[in-house]
Image: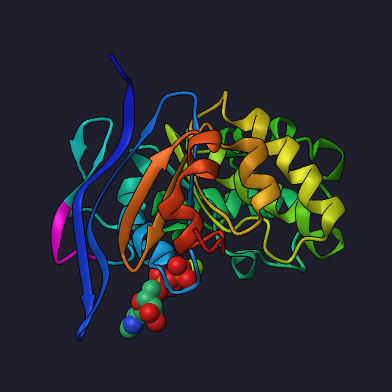
Amino acid sequence: MTDIVLETRGITKSFGSLCASDGISIDLQAGEIHAVIGPNGAGKSTLIHQICGGLRPDAGQVLLQGQDVTALPTAARARKGLGRTFQISALAMEDSVLENVMLGALGASGRPWRFFVPVMGDRTLRDRATAALERVGLQDALHSRTAALSHGQRRQLEVAVALTLDPRAFVMDEPMAGLGAEGSKTLTGFLDGLRDQAPILLVEHDMDAVFALADRISVLVYGRIIATGTVDEIRRDPAVREAYLGDPA
Ligand code: ADP
Ligand code: MG
C-alpha cells in the first residue's frame, strides 16, 4: 500500500479559452521527491497555486493527508501541514534571519501578528524558529541581516519558515531559479536531506537537480500530465522526448 500525503484529483482551471490545468491528478507519497517538469507555460505554477490555495480550481479536488482542502485558504492549508516555500520577496532583507523566521511563521500560520506586539519576546515561537534554523544549517546566522545571505541560504531560510509549522509535505516552485551552478549543487544536497522531514512536490527547470533528486517525475504539457515515472522511465519515454526533451523521436 502506498502512503499518499498530498493528492490532486482532476484539477481543472481555465483562463478564458486557455485550459491551464486540464484534469490533473497527481500524488505525493511519503519519503519521496516528486518532480514536475514541462515547458514554459505548461501550467506548472498554476497547478502549484491551486495546491497551495492561492487559486481556486474550476473543478477537481486537493487532498492533504486524505482530507479535502480544496475550499480552504492558504494559511489554513499551511496549518494543516502544507509547507510552501515563499518567494524571496516575502523576506524582509533588513531584518535578521531569526526575525524573518519568527515573523514568517506567524504570517504563514495566519495569526494576526500585528496585534501581538512583543512577538520577538515570544519564547515558544523563538525556540521553534531557532530549532528550524538549526535544521536548515543556518544556526550561525541567526543574527545576520537577511540581505547578507546568499540566494541559496535565503531558500534555506524560506524552508526554515515552513518548518516552524511542522509540514507534512513541501511544495516548491523552481527553488533553483537564480542560483549559480555552485548554489544549485548546495541546494540540491540540502533538498536531498529534507525529504526525510517531509516529501517534496518539486517544480524545477534545472534538469541536473531533477535527475539527481527525483524519485518520480511527472511531465506536464499544455495543462496535462503526459507521463509519470522514474528518472529512467521518463528519460526513455518517446512521447516525453518528443514533447519536452527536444528529441525528434
Ligand atoms: P508554467 O509555470 O508551467 O510556466 P503557468 O502555470 O505560469 O506555466 O501558466 C500556464 C498558462 O496559463 C500560460 O499560458 C499562462 O500565460 C497562463 N496563465 C497563468 N496565470 C494566468 C492568469 N492569472 N491569467 C491568465 N492566464 C494565466
Ligand atoms: Mg512557473
Q: Residue furthest left?
A: 59
Residue 181 seen in this snapshot: yes
Q: Percent from the top left, x then y, of residue 117? A: 54, 58
- Let me know if residue 188 is in the magenta part: no
Q: Looking at the picture, how far across and down is residue 89, in whole percent? A: 62, 70
Give the left or right position of residue 118, taking residue 179 as reference: left
Could you tell me residue 238's position as x and y percent?
45, 50
**Rendered position, 12 above or below 238:** below
Along the viewing direction, whichever of 137 and 27 lies nearer the viewer = 27
Which residue occupies the foreground of this view, 86 or 181? Answer: 181
Q: Give the farthest residue toward the front.
A: 249
Residue 209 x, y percent position in the rendering: 68, 46
How many marks overall? 0
Q: Residue at x 56, y 59 (%)?
A: 245
Q: Relative to residue 153, is residue 218 drawn left or right?
A: left
Q: Is residue 221 above or below residue 239?
A: below
- Above or below, 31 against 92 in this view is above
Q: Is residue 179 left or right of residue 239?
A: right
Residue that appears at 50% across and 62% down: 244
- Residue 57 lies in the magenta stretch: yes
Q: Main secondary structure of the magenta part?
A: loop
Which residue corresponds to the image point at 22% horizontal and 53% vertical from the top-left?
72
Quarter holding the N terminus is: top left
Where 214 sits versus 15, above or below? Answer: above
Give the magenta range.
56-60
